[in-house]
Amino acid sequence: MSDRERKRGGRRGRQEAEKSATPAIVPFITRKIPEYELLDEEGLALIENNAEIILEEIGIDFRYEPAIALFREAGADIDGERIRFPRGMCRKIIQDSAPTTFEQKARNPLRNVTLGGKATVFAPVYGPPFVRDLDKGRRYGMIEDFRNFVKLTYMLPSLHHSGGTVCEPTDLPVNKRHFDMVYSHMKYSDKPFMGSVTHPDRAQDTVDMCKILFGEDYIQENTVVINLINANSPMTFDETMLGASEVYARNNQASIISPFILSGAMSPVTVAGTMAQILAEAMAGMAFTQLVRPGSPVIFGTFSSSISMQSGAPTFGTPEPSLVINGCAALARRLGVPFRSGGSLCGSKISDAQAAYESANTLLPTITAGVNFVLHAAGWLEGGLSSGYEKLVMDADQLGMMQVFANGTDLSENGQALSAIREVGPGQHFLGCNHTQENFKTAFYRSNIADNNSFEQWEMEGSMDATMRANKLWKKMLNEYEAPPLDPAIDEALLAFIQQRKDSFADSNI
Amino acid sequence: MSDRERKRGGRRGRQEAEKSATPAIVPFITRKIPEYELLDEEGLALIENNAEIILEEIGIDFRYEPAIALFREAGADIDGERIRFPRGMCRKIIQDSAPTTFEQKARNPLRNVTLGGKATVFAPVYGPPFVRDLDKGRRYGMIEDFRNFVKLTYMLPSLHHSGGTVCEPTDLPVNKRHFDMVYSHMKYSDKPFMGSVTHPDRAQDTVDMCKILFGEDYIQENTVVINLINANSPMTFDETMLGASEVYARNNQASIISPFILSGAMSPVTVAGTMAQILAEAMAGMAFTQLVRPGSPVIFGTFSSSISMQSGAPTFGTPEPSLVINGCAALARRLGVPFRSGGSLCGSKISDAQAAYESANTLLPTITAGVNFVLHAAGWLEGGLSSGYEKLVMDADQLGMMQVFANGTDLSENGQALSAIREVGPGQHFLGCNHTQENFKTAFYRSNIADNNSFEQWEMEGSMDATMRANKLWKKMLNEYEAPPLDPAIDEALLAFIQQRKDSFADSNI
């Protein structure tokens, strides 16, 4: 490269580079690398045994009469809301009918995702009441923010899934916002998405909207929505979540049964204790879905963080939750169900080095553990209180790297590159050799956030940090956004359904 | 915690917290977790076979007459500087005499480190001409900076090793600065350190200073200095490095034979091709040390990065170098020698999110690969052009996390925590239970950089990012630094030796 080219080349060079996207666009990752297993057979069996002790001796509270009735019929020991399960009962119910892998259909069939096995699916952050960007700082999320996150997620190839509550649209009434959230996923993206779980009626509304989008018969045969059912840890499931899960299971739609754990508060302060409790809770919840409808798709979920024993605040990206993710992934494989965990979690309020260290420290163990569904894979800030615009695109860049990492090492003849080594020989360089010329476009993952220019060029271009570059990127993307085509008749039917339902009851913020 | 305590508590609470250091202070990490192996037996054997093809058919250039003579005598095929090695020859020479593990002695025996096996040793950044801090920005490194990095490294328990050229002291003449560098490690720290490799005479000066510090007989029996010998990749070793390595080997001191690879320039653009070349180069270099003195300690080193195929700039924290680190660690285990690689590498000019993502993406694969000696484990910025004050303490915090991660999961009865789960039961919380009270001080890794307070408290305290907190931390540490005691007679002898040597030849910047 001449000096003249170098001088004017920085930006143009990068734009050229962006055109040749490095990782192939895939609907989800199929990992070619082995899972990393930190616990051996003996360790895993010990945790499984402890989970059975919890289920048999301590029991789980199900605050939902229909669940109690189902478990009574299945032979559990019922004591009010407390259910104790004979050893092996939950495991057997799950293994008798729950699918080891299943497909979630998207309205664009090219976007269908597989859950389970060697598949890994990335979905954005879920649940924050706040949003943050570099221009306006932190504020309550609005439906416009929600739509923006759906649009950006649609445009980011390393996010395979549109997610669910990408932020809370706090400008809409609590009891009606699910209509606008589900509609946004359906309208502004054609990737698979998640449904409402905050009330059984809202789950039913989600199912009814899916019937309009996909066809009534289609959804009884196919899973088109997956749904986050948190346990009220320790060892409790509440009526809202169980009711929503029941609606979905009855309609052959998927639940992620996720113990929500801040170790030290909702579980013991130790990793092994936390894992046993998570396994017990998850098995009880998954067994419930199989009693509602045997064979309905269900995912073993885990959200695990530690808390600061000084302030009580949750902490992220520390070693203990990584160990929990790794162990629980292995336990899910042994049970034979898909597994959800991980993400790009952090406690930082902003997308600084703390956020990045912590996110990477969560994400890489997620991939090497073999997690199947990765919620919060991009955009998470502040312990999940805030969805970050810049963080979303920064994390998505990292997800692209994970895709390449999960491909492992190419051992083909081209990968071995002996011809290149022979051609070049000692003391020369590989830049111009045939093998390099033939492979350079796809040889290395190319970040759209990182700046690898010289210090001088970086300084000349404004000494921007990663967040400032990400700020430019998401704005450019939103500017260029084009909605995927949607049959106008379906769109009208969805809007009519929403209007009719919204008119049928008063606004409320409960 | 009452509101009043909470209000005034933030800082004081954290100071209290810092007193109960979470990970035990250890001289080095002994990993209890298994190594993650991405390549199977077949893949590793393929790379080994290709390395033998390189050694046998292509050969390695040794630009050093004594090396050529040694290899000729050992039966290699000599063609000028080009040496071709009969299949298996280098491997056999290494396996016949190189130690699989060895100990590097420190002047404080509590700081001795083991190299090899399940041991992992962290050393700071090596080589940058520049330094950076938040107050003064980026500037050339000076001997004062060098001393500061040695002092900070001494005070950081997660750095086990004082390293070598923590920054270039550019205010000192090139041909004499090694005296001040080695002396700084000896004087301001009692951790093990690295010697000069920029000229055989400077290697000899290092050895002579070690004789003064440790005693002349002691160093013939013990390894007290380890030294970074880069290959001039591809497939070339130059006179300077070989001459320095020869001095060290003859004196029973350790060399790290490190192919220095920017894939696409010094090696093929593929991971498998790069690994084969690295193995060939490293085996040739290690064999040389064993011919100089059989049984002298030697480490298989790898520095691997990719280059941007647009600008030619090196990139870090991308997936391909992680795969290289992982594969080479397995190859070193099969060869039976200690392995050096990894670090907290990044291309970012500042300690922002790019720096942290990239550093974490290098460090975690380093740990899970089972790397024994991790140079550049803290402080690296800008592709190694700059040593960062803030980055040093930020990375060191991450190293502390790696220590906890490497301990794996505690499966003791206390770790299983069934008593806690029994005591608490469904729907309650674990904060006050006996098990939590007994374990909370050491339950979770506690970062000294991360802010996990509420958004409101963080904002009230100045909305600081991680770099700003790190800035306060390293200044506080330097303020509190106290030198480890050094026998005044030894100190005087060292200074006298340095003075005499410095007076014996003219300053030069070559």
Image (cartoon, coloured by chain):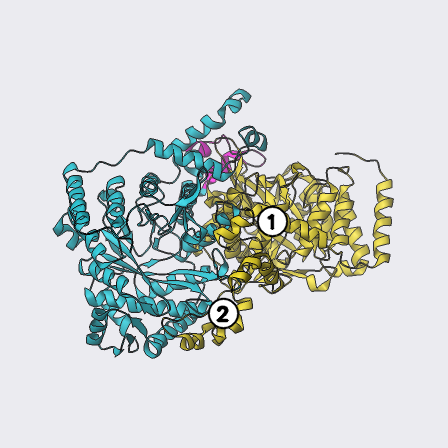
Chain colours: A yellow, B cyan
Label 1 CA crowd tier, 10 Å (few <14, some 14–19, many 20+): many
Q: Residues under labels 1 and 2: Cα distance?
A: 31 Å
Q: Is residue B221 left or right of residue B233?
A: left
Mark 1 lies on a secondary structure that is helix
Q: Mark 1 or mark 2, which has the lower sequence index?
A: 2
Residue type indicated by callout 1: Ala
x and y, in percent, of residue B225 in the image: 24, 52
Q: In this view, does A420 lie to the left or right of A313?
A: left
Establish if B317 lies above or below B92: above
Residue type indicated by callout 2: Asp
Q: Do labels 1 and 2 share a chain?
A: yes
x and y, in percent, of residue A400 in the image: 57, 58
Q: In this view, does B415 lie to the left or right of A110?
A: left
x and y, in percent, of residue A403 in the image: 56, 60
- From the viewer's side, name the closer residue of B467 and A166: B467
- Residue under label 2: A410
- From the viewer's side, name the closer residue of B122 and A314: B122
- Residue under label 1: A470
Label 2 CA crowd tier, 10 Å (few <14, some 14–19, many 20+): some
Establish if A198 lies above or below B5: below
Which segment did they paint magenta? B417-439
- From the viewer's side, name the closer residue of A446 and A265: A446
Residue B485 appears in view: yes
Q: Is residue B425 magenta?
A: yes
Q: Quadrant of residue B412?
A: top left
Q: Does the magenta stretch include residue B314?
A: no
Residue A52 shows which numbered tag?
none
